[in-house]
Amino acid sequence: MSKINRYPCYRTPYVQAFGRFLEKFPWSWYGTFTFEYRVSVDKAITSAIEMIMKYDETSIYFLCCEYSKSGVHLHALINGISDIDRLPFQEEWSWRYGLVKIEVFNRDLGGQNYIVKYLEAGKAEFKTNLTVEG
């Protein structure tokens, strides 16, 4: 059973609509980025963007920074970083900031909904370089 079916916060009309929008893009990777120390939302987002662009400056990304009492962490949808660069990327992030997990994106697992689950409640902020024509 996917996470979407198990948790009500992933089934709200807002999250479902945002997820349908995000699933239209050719994502390669789904990632979770953490920090060993407290950072601001801006620092978290800037750090992720700098790392993504360092490994592939043509990447597109959708980042969502969630905040709680224990600090912030990011979820990301990324298209660009090649499979060869994924492991060095993870090693560098771990060395510089904290834990990271990057997996092949599988839209059937609902990552496009999971990433935006707290936006509606005001417990997250997002940043993207997506452009939409039309």
Image (spheres, rainbow, N blue to C red):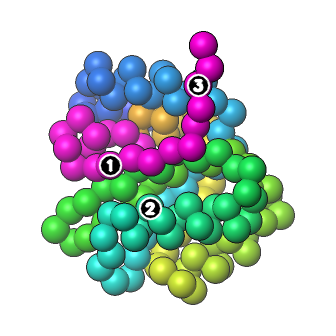
Q: Is residue 92 left or right of residue 84?
A: left
Q: Which residue is mark 3?
A: 132
Residue 120 vs residue 59, the one in the foreground: 59
Q: Amino acid at mark 3?
A: Val
Under circle 2, the secondary element is: helix
Q: Disc 2 residue type?
A: Ile
Measured as percent of width and height from the top left, residue 78 is found at: 62, 48
Left or right, 118 with respect to 30, comes to left
* Pointer 1 or 2: first along the chain: 2
* Nearer-N-terminus badge (3/1): 1
In which quadrant of the rendered image does the C terminus lie? top right
Which disc number belongs to residue 109? none
Magenta region, main secondary structure = loop
Mark 1 burial class by Cα count in 10 Å: few <14, some 14-19, many 20+: some
Q: What stretch of residues is rendered in magenta? A: 115-134
Asked if the stretch drawn in magenta spans residue 60, the answer is: no
* Cβ atoms under marks 3 and 1 closer than 8 Å: no
Q: From this viewpoint, is residue 23 visible?
A: yes
Residue 125: mark in rendering: 1
Q: Is residue 132 shown in magenta? A: yes
Q: Secondary structure at mark 1?
A: strand
Q: Position of residue 46 (x, y in %)?
A: 48, 65
Asked if labels 2 and 1 touch by Cβ distance under 8 angstroms, the answer is yes
Question: Residue, x 64% and y 80% (percent of image)?
Answer: 92
Looking at the rendered structure, the kind of residue marked 1 is Glu
Q: Using the numbered discs, state the Cα–Cα distance from disc 2 to disc 3 in whole angstroms.
A: 21 Å
